[in-house]
Image (tube, grey):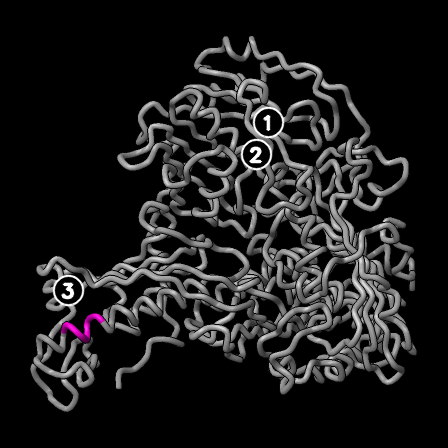
Amino acid sequence: MRGSILGTAVRRVEDPDLITGNTTYVGNLSANGSIDGLLHVAFVRSPLAHGLVTGIETADAAAADGVVAVYTAADLGLPAHHGLMVLNPDLPRPPLATDRVRFVGEAVAMVVAESKAAAVDAAELVEVDYDPLPAVVDPEEAFAPDAELQFPEQGSNLAAGLRDGNSAAALDGAEVVVRARMVNQRLAVVPMEGNAIVVDPRGDANHDLLIHVSTQMPHGFRAQLAGILGLDAATVRVIAPHVGGAFGGKAGVLAEHTAVVGASRRLGRPLAWVETRSENLVSMPHGRSQVGYYELGLTRDGMMTGLRCRVVGDAGAYAGFGGALPLHMTYVMAPGVYAIPKVGYDAASALTNTTPVGAFRGAGRPEAAAHLERLVDIAAVELNMDPVELRRRNFLDPSAFPLTTPVGAAYDVGDYDLPLREALRLADYEKLREEQQSRREAQDPVQLGIGIAVYVEITAGGGGSEYGSVHVHADGTATVSAGTSAHGQGHATSFAMLVSDRLGIPMDRISYAQSDTATVPRGGGTGGSRSLQMGGSAVDKAATDVLDQARNRAAAMLEASVDDVELTDGGEFGVTGVPTPTVTWQQIASGAEAAGQTLFAGLDATQDGATFPFGAHVSVVEVDTETGRVSPRRHLAVDDCGRILNPLLVEGQQHGGLAQGIAQALYEEVVYDADGQPLTSTLADYHVPTAADLFPFEAATTETPTHMNPLGAKGIGESATIGSTPAVQNAIVDALRPFGVRHIDLPCTPERIWRAIRAGGEDPWREPPAIFDDLPRRGGDSTEEAGAI
């Protein structure tokens, strides 16, 4: 029997090109002169957070050297549209602002010129007259009776909202109730490569329109753009070349994309737009931005009886996708890993004069985990119970899976104590507690904090289908493709491993094709940690089909029954029990080609629902109580993503997720002043940690395979982000327990810590906005709501 390559640490095949610079990003296409007649775009952006547009003067810009055209919304006449999804159908965003601007950085006009420099210079000559209006920046203040309305015709700043019939009833019968108001701050996505698009209206031999775009969902981009512009999707070709990170921020068609496509079609010439870093920080959709009012009911011996959640989401301007997350993903994951019998959940998303909020690594699940795990630690202090013990008393029973939670989430399989046991073992938890006690007794100014977080998340939400194909060529090499779209995850490696394992073809003879709608017929793209379980299952299914084709051909060539033909250790076909003769893949594929046929399978794999990865994190920090400085000492992540295909890829995803999750706990926050001016519009102000700011991570895994797909795989791309943030936050508050500190909002900056120490045991609660009393009731049952996500 042939040995399997699956489950082994195989080095990434993508990396040589990335390391040596043998890559092609959209920005390369715009700069290397490969596209004849290419013009460049610069946007004129609003300096105001809110104001009426009373006039736009473009004559001076149009007359500038190198300028080909200057366009406003009135010139292009493009339809307003939504982003990745529709939160409120009445609030689409125009590609260029029309009568009103609603956030600093909103595109108002665009300059098209022979060079990027000429376009940028001319953009300075466009004069826009504004009538300033008051700005609303805080999502809770957006619901105040006197708040300025973003869309006056709407009558309020409520983008969307839902409530249970009586969420307060979830706390009935509780002997102890703990509560907290918690902020999950606004974050910038900050991919290494910002948004970029090159549009060629001349198309190619088979398409009327050719678009290169930095996106994580090429087929989705094509479908959405075709719908916006009324085009036949079959006439549009979308290619995503190498993509320098996305993290959810490059899903869907943005306003700037539509404007560039519209201008290119109007001029009949190819256009390029590659955003600057400052543009990226103010215009790419932000992430997170929730305020949670959570209350947990328990018995005195620590059994959870009910959870009440009231969540304010910040949709930003134009009801961004992120505004939907409190109503959906955060809702579905609200009870987490615990057997909470009653969950009451209300959510309201506010319109504010800020950058629209979209998806960011985890998209709604990190918020749910951070809120719940923080509340569990508050409960442990209230009950004078070890936080590990409180969690264990309330874990869902592994023997009860599959199960449906009170909010309708269909969990596939889980054993939440499994990764927790491993994390505590690796951390030597009892020894850490002993060290902590010693420091407390000595009144050491540098206190030790130990934070626990146990999480479950949803991946491949809703299930569905994905495309995969395998083609074995006449020379014995193979090409694999999938409808997913890699931007750093390692698809080329993992999918080649599946094909190599199934067909016995060496990985160095397998190439990967993706992210081109002309060569890959369909696909859901990459998002929600779906790629391996969906795309990988499709590739595995296609490889099995090709293997069956090859065995039939080999049987004819060997004059044997197909049931007796086997694939040998050397990757050739022979007859069981007969050492010779054998036939090679090259012989079989070349024979098929000579007969006018191919060894090829392209098909879809389906998955009936989502999968639910889980894990446990232990964070160990030192907090200088005199300055508020936090020094992370250790972070142990034990994540369970089902069956592991390649431990090296999993570890890489864990490390990336840990960097982002820990950064949210300690450093990152988008900040606006009271007038809606962004104070973090450069990387000098917005603190993305470098390697020097971080420390070695300790990443481990457990394996609990799922029955939802033949690989037994769940997602891993977002898991470490979800588990790490509350673990670090809990560790910091744990270090400050002797000072009576009950809670510190994210990010836990030195100033916030210093102030919390001096404020003592301030209650982390205030009454939520009255908007929750006026929300429409959640329609249908909770299972239907969860299934619609």
Q: Provide the residue designation for mark 1.
A: 96
Q: Position of residue 480 (x, y in %)?
A: 30, 60
In magenta, the rendered stretch is 549-553
Q: Secondary structure at mark 3?
A: helix
Residue at position x 69%, y 22% from top?
A: 99
Q: Is residue 571 left or right of residue 194?
A: left
Q: Position of residue 363 (x, y in %)?
A: 62, 56
Q: Tell me whether the residue at label 2 lies in contact with that at label 1, contact meaning CB atoms closer than 8 angstroms.
A: yes
Identify the amino acid type marked 2.
Ala
Question: Dot 3, crowdedness within 10 Å: few (<14), some or many (≥20)?
Answer: many
Q: Provide the residue designation for mark 2.
A: 255
Q: Secondary structure at mark 1?
A: loop
Identify the amino acid type marked 3.
Ala
Judge by depth and name the residue closer to the eye, 675 or 50.
50
Q: Provide the residue designation for mark 3.
A: 589
Q: Quadrant of the C terminus?
A: bottom right
